[in-house]
Image (cartoon, helix red, strand yellow):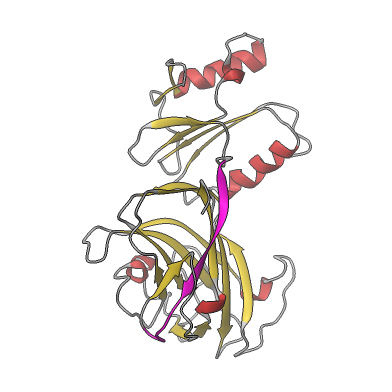
Amino acid sequence: ARRVEASVFVVHGLNDWNVKTEHFAGWWDELAKRHVPRKIWLHQGGHGGPGNNASVTLPDGRTWTYKQTENRWFDYWLWNVPNGIMDEPTAVLQREDRVYTTYANWPDPAAREVAVKLAATDAARPGTLTSGHRPKARVEQSFVDEGRTIHPDTLVADPDAASPNRLAYLSPALTDEVRISGRPEMRLRMAIDNKPDANLTAYLVDYGPAGSTAEPRVVTRGWMDPQNRTDPSRTRPVKQGKLYDYRWTLEPKDYVFPAGHRIGVVVFSTDQEYTLLPLGGTKLRVAPNDSEVRLPVVGGR
């Protein structure tokens, strides 16, 4: 980033799981520190563009398509055409209803990190997410890694039922919509009981109300190797049965959880789509009352 002298126009799909959102977001942040002129256009697609005719209406009432915006960016920066593009909002983002809107920047400057605590009162039943006080009961919960043979869709399903292969934690039904903008961070106290290493995966999920038949929607996800808990480039052995504190970020996201829905965190080991695939049988143990997820909530707590 320190060698970039050109202006930068980032275009990316929020649901691209090939080139992931962190692949642009880390660079975007560094460019900001160096005051590189930037613009960003985020759409709800995957590994592709938004389509030339995708359009956004600016606060002043003018409407531009994506292709017009791209052309105006080049007109200004290559040909010095005074078209006002640098006076427009920096971020264009397609919301879940497929309507484009504008923001002053991305992540949203109004986002504040909110610690949402994991809690459980039973060793087997799904736990809860709370921004208030945890229950006094302190229990540990365990699961067995079978991600090599069980697809993540199965591990995310049925969050209100106990599963031997994952742990789920759910908020109460939201009384209002909640928007996140940026990087969620998982902070998990966990032990590997019978192996020297394991995969570690967390999914942030949008669940419907209790009893709903709506399909869960995976909002974002993230992974880490416990042996690299302090540094991605340094391997430190894990002592079997010992609880460690692990921290890792999930892929950056901008998402609105609707009112009435529930925010869910699903913790498991091997992710069939994104990690190595060891043989099953690894036993993992979590201390939920010492764990939390930190969400970049627009508007804060």
Say left or right for 269 vs 86.
Answer: left
- Residue 119 in magenta stretch: yes
In this orientation, which residue lies closer to the viewer: 275 or 158?
158
- Residue 67 in magenta stretch: no
- Residue 264: quadrant of the picture: bottom left
Q: Which residues are magenta?
A: 110-124
Question: In this picture, is 275 found above or below 51?
Answer: below
Residue 285 at what x, y percent from top left? 51, 84
Give the residue drawn at x 60%, y 81%.
Answer: 197
Question: In this picture, is 26 found above or below 168?
Answer: above
Give the residue drawn at x 32%, y 56%.
Answer: 261
Residue at the extreme top: 81
In this orientation, which residue lies closer to the viewer: 162 or 81?
162
- Residue 120: quadrant of the picture: bottom left
Say left or right for 287 vs 63.
Answer: right
Res 15 seen here: no
Residue 267 at what x, y percent from top left? 46, 72
| Magenta portion: prevailing SS class | strand
Give the residue drawn at x 49%, y 64%.
Answer: 131
